[in-house]
Amino acid sequence: MWVSGGIPVTRRDGKPMETRNRVTLCRCGASAMKPLCDGTRKELGFTDS
C-alpha cells in the first residue's frame, strides 16, 4: 500500500521513522521490515481480493 503526503510512520520498536513524502506499507503481515513492505507478498501469492 502506497502512502503519500508526509504521513508519520512508527517502526515496530515504537520509534518514529524519518518522515518521507511516500512509503510502501506491508499489507500481507509477513514483511521482515514492518511496517514497510519488503515484497514478501509476491512469494506468498498474497492478493488484496
Image (cartoon, rainbow, N blue to C red):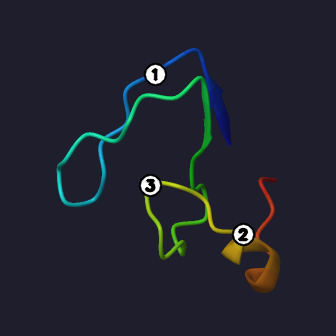
39, above or below 13, in the image:
below
Q: Are marks 3 and 1 in contact (CB under 8 Å)?
A: no
Measured from the top left, where is residue 34 in percent x and y? 44, 62
Nearest the viewer among 48 and 11 is 11
Q: Secondary structure at mark 3?
A: loop
Query: How far is mark 1 from mark 2, CA to CA?
Result: 21 Å
Check disc 3 and report the residue beneath it.
35
Measured from the top left, where is residue 10 in percent x and y? 30, 42
Q: Secondary structure at mark 1?
A: loop
Check disc 1 and report the residue beneath it.
7
Check disc 2 and report the residue beneath it.
39
Amino acid under disc 1: Ile
Nearest the viewer among 49 and 5 is 5
Measured from the top left, where is residue 30 in percent x and y? 54, 75
In the picture, the disc for residue 24 is none
For disc 2, the neighbor class at 10 Å (few under 14, some 14 to 19, many from 20) is: some
Q: Secondary structure at mark 2?
A: loop
Amino acid under disc 2: Gly
Position of residue 7 in the picture relative to residue 17 (left or right):
right
39, above or below 6, in the image:
below
- Residue drawn at x 61%, y 65% is 28
48, above or below 8, in the image:
below
